[in-house]
Amino acid sequence: MTHAGTIAELTAIVSRAAAVILALDPTKVGRRAKPDGSPVSAADEAAEAVIIEGLSRVLPGLPVVSEEAVAREQPSELGRSFALVDPLDGTREFLAGSDEFTVNVAIVVDARPRLGIIAAPALGLIWRGVVSAGAERLRLSPGSRLDEVGEIASIRTRRRPADGLAAMISRSHFDAGTAAFLDGLPITSRVACGSSLKFCRIAEGAQTSMCGWGRLRNGMWLRGTQLSSQPAVWCWGRTALHCPTVA
């Protein structure tokens, strides 16, 4: 399958997962706390089921590292390539009735993300890209066919402003350590945002930079999906660091 064919199929999968989330009432959906205290809901698990089924059909045999499934059982072996999935990033925001939650799928090859798709179900937006092939934002209602896309716009990061950086920070996980880190940087403004929506706003040039870090429960640091064709650093986690090298 070509890159175009793969990203089209994965976009359709992510869109279906987004529709499954929106079909559930956040005030009534089942929920529980994971061992680390973070929430997981029936929406997380329903979206994950849609994504894992779709990946097994479109990319059979490809190992999948998905947040809720890994919490139950870690894969024995990944190989050079695997799919990285967070079926509902921003569960707290979803349960609180906010629109700042996302569906995330990436393909990782040789420890580097090569293709990524992030959907914001409540916003009807999808950001997607392939490394060295550019990135774009789609306006697509969750669950709709790809031929029903309302808008496709190429995206790229902005140049670093001369007067300082705008830091996008986690709405739910901002802490004293992150504040201290930011205090040592030339930050002119801070914008709070939930989930990986922060990364998408950077990729499309709506904001200029993000600062912080993400850490997995197993202690490993993770660089996540790089959607933009311009240099950036991305991570899925509590916050993210984006240091553009565009002159």
Image (spheres, helix red, strand yellow):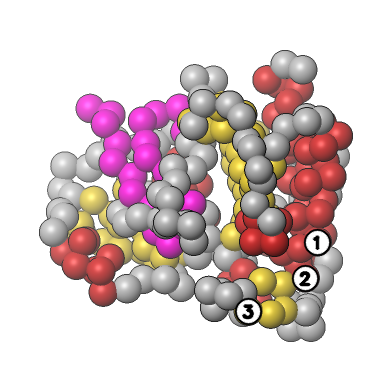
Image side of residue 234 versus residue 30, left or right:
left
Q: Secondary structure at mark 3?
A: strand
Please say whether residue 217 is visible from this viewpoint: yes
Residue at which label 2 appears: 42
| Labels 2 and 1 touching (C-beta < 8 A) | yes
Instruction: Find the magenta span and give its range.
Output: 228-247
User: Could you say which is closer to the camera, residue 94 or residue 214?
Assistant: 214
Q: Residues within 10 Å of mark 3 (few under 14, many from 20)?
A: few
The amino acid sitting under disc 3 is: Ala
The amino acid sitting under disc 2 is: Ala
Q: CA distance from mark 3 to mark 2?
A: 12 Å
Name which residue lies at 13% across and 59% down. 184
Image side of residue 235 versus residue 188, left or right:
right
| Labels 3 and 2 touching (C-beta < 8 A) | no
**Residue 150: horizontal and vertical position, in percent?**
73, 40
Establish if 190 lies above or below 113. Answer: below
Q: Residues within 10 Å of mark 2 (few under 14, many from 20)?
A: some
N-term mark: 3 or 2? 3
- Residue 33: which numbered mark, if any? 3
Specify whether residue 154 is painted magenta. Answer: no
User: Could you say which is closer to the camera, residue 199 or residue 72?
Assistant: 72
